Image: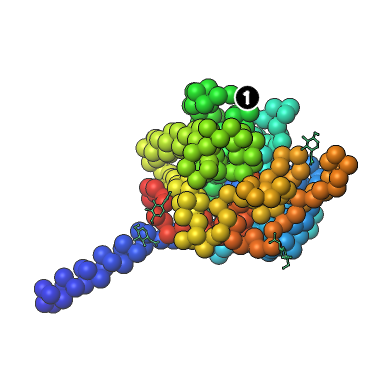
């Protein structure tokens, strides 16, 4: 072989490696997901027995499907990329919930810290982990009894499967109603210790592949800007609440340190840390470059520009305020909005975020 040919071959090979390193190549037989509304596929609505009103779900499912969105969530697009079906919520009890390729324990409103009487979701992260453990134990019983094997994961999927996490937004965002920035910053290690406890329980239950999303720029959510941003000295770049984003960044830094520690502690795990914050903040700051027209204003809400968000009436509802009937309706074209309802992203924003995750450019993987 001539030496020029060898050099050329090496160039070709190294290019192939670079392409592979830069795009996520998923091969997992099942996914077990934990989190809040960012990845809830019907858990909270099943638990509490309610249905999200239209226009929730107007775009893809044509029914709310229990997702706090007009359509699909980031997790749905990631399942697509893995050629796996959408995840059923753990508490789905009607229809034919199929858990063969995974199960979703995420519930809207959930926090990492344990829930209290005022929590929207009773399923803090620790409870979600316990639900998983019960799920696994029952699956193993079924498999031993040769029952339902088409509907539950095969035993080896628990070790080979991907464990995904997107939780923490409600711990940070919710804390701002009763605490100041310094108090929240000092609470972060406690939040992450609780997260670590849950991850270790999952490891002890056989989980080996961890895929962890950090938290987004929650200071840019119209829900928070509409209430706390009335004091405009609190607003910074892009019209986002500075302290909220600062707390989110501090949380993310410590979450990333935890991921590095976890990877170092166990030789037999794969940990992927995904920088959702950077993807979402770039989407907001450079929205027009990415094909969006409204980076902050909610598509579905009440009040009109600049935020179209009013804490007294949420998306899809009609109410009488001061004797006048008002309705929080959807916008005409949700695809140009980043924010669906002031708290959650639109399907089109979720699709953009997922496409960026899939480039691999925002993950820190130790395979
Ligand atoms: C980690 O990921 C690599 C590549 O996907 C895989 O070959 C390996 O088995 C994984 N390790 C564990 C412990 O699952
Ligand atoms: C906006 O886009 C420019 C150009 O690509 C980039 O340099 C900048 O970092 C982006 N802004 C944010 C906040 O990501
Ligand atoms: C209702 O009345 C209160 C007090 O008069 C006022 O502050 C508020 O803006 C009114 N709400 C609406 C929707 O007009
Ligand atoms: C939505 O579209 C209708 C019909 O084209 C138009 O009358 C209305 O003003 C639009 N609403 C908004 C908020 O753009
Ligand atoms: C990853 O980021 C690099 C540098 O910003 C960029 O050139 C490349 O196109 C990105 N890769 C993908 C798949 O988007």
Q: Nearer the viewer, residue 31 or 226?
A: 226
Q: Nearer the viewer, residue 234 or 47?
A: 234
Q: Is mark 1 within 8 Å of ligand 3?
A: no
Residue at the image position 49 percent from the left and 26 percent from the top: 185
Task: Name the residue beneath numbered marker 1.
Answer: 178
Q: Nearer the viewer, residue 319 or 87?
A: 319
Pointer 1: residues within 10 angstroms few (<14), some, or many (20+)?
few
Q: Position of residue 304 (x, y in %)?
A: 69, 50
- In terms of image quarters, where does ligand 3 lie? top right
Q: Position of residue 6 (x, y in %)?
A: 16, 72
Determine whether the residue tagged by mark 1 lies in a helix, strand or loop: loop
Taking 362 as reference, is 134 above or below it?
Answer: above
Q: Nearer the viewer, residue 322 or 125?
A: 322
Q: Is residue 110 visible?
A: no
Horizontally, residue 358 falls left or right of residue 95, namely left
Q: Is residue 23 visible?
A: yes
Residue at the image position 36 percent from the left and 62 percent from the top: 20
The N terminus lies in quadrant: bottom left
Horizontally, residue 233 falls left or right of residue 258, namely right
Q: Position of residue 223 (x, y in %)?
A: 64, 41
Taking 98 as reference, is 243 above or below it?
Answer: above
Residue at the image position 52 percent from the left and 63 percent from the top: 291
The quarter of the displayed image where residue 121 is located:
top right
Which scheme is used to colour this image of the protein? Answer: rainbow
């Amino acid at each position: 072989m001539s030496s020029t040919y060898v050099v050329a071959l090496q160039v070709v090979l190294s290019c192939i490696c670079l392409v592979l390193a830069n795009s996520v190549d998923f091969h997992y037989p099942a996914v077990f997901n934990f989190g809040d509304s960012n990845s809830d596929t019907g858990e909270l609505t099943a638990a509490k027995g309610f249905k999200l009103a239209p226009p929730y779900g107007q775009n893809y499912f044509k029914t709310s499907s229990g997702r706090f969105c007009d359509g699909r969530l980031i997790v749905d697009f990631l399942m697509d990329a893995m050629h796996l079906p959408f995840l059923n919520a753990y508490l789905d009890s009607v229809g034919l919930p199929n858990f063969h390729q995974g199960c979703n324990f995420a519930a809207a409103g959930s926090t990492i810290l344990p829930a209290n009487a005022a929590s929207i979701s009773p399923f803090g992260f620790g409870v979600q982990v316990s639900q998983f453990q019960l799920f696994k134990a029952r699956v193993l019983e079924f498999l031993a009894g040769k029952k339902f094997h088409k509907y539950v994961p095969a035993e080896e999927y628990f070790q080979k499967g991907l464990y995904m996490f997107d939780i923490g937004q409600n711990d940070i965002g919710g804390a701002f109603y009763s605490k100041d920035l310094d108090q929240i910053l000092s609470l972060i290690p406690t939040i992450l210790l609780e997260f670590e406890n849950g991850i270790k329980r999952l490891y002890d239950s056989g989980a080996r592949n961890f895929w962890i999303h950090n938290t987004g720029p929650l200071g840019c959510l119209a829900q928070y800007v509409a209430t706390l941003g009335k004091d405009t000295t609190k607003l910074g770049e892009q019209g986002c609440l500075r302290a909220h984003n600062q707390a989110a960044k501090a949380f993310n830094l410590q979450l990333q340190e935890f991921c590095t520690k976890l990877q170092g502690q166990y030789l037999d795990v794969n940990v992927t840390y995904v920088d959702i914050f950077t993807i979402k903040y770039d989407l907001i700051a450079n929205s027009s470059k990415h094909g969006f027209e409204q980076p902050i204003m909610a598509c579905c809400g009440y009040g009109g520009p600049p935020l179209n968000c009013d804490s007294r009436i949420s998306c899809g509802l009609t109410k009488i305020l001061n004797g006048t009937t008002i309705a929080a309706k959807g916008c005409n074209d949700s695809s140009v909005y980043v924010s669906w309802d002031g708290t959650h992203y639109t399907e089109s924003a979720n699709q953009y975020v997922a496409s960026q995750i899939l480039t691999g450019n925002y993950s820190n993987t130790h395979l």
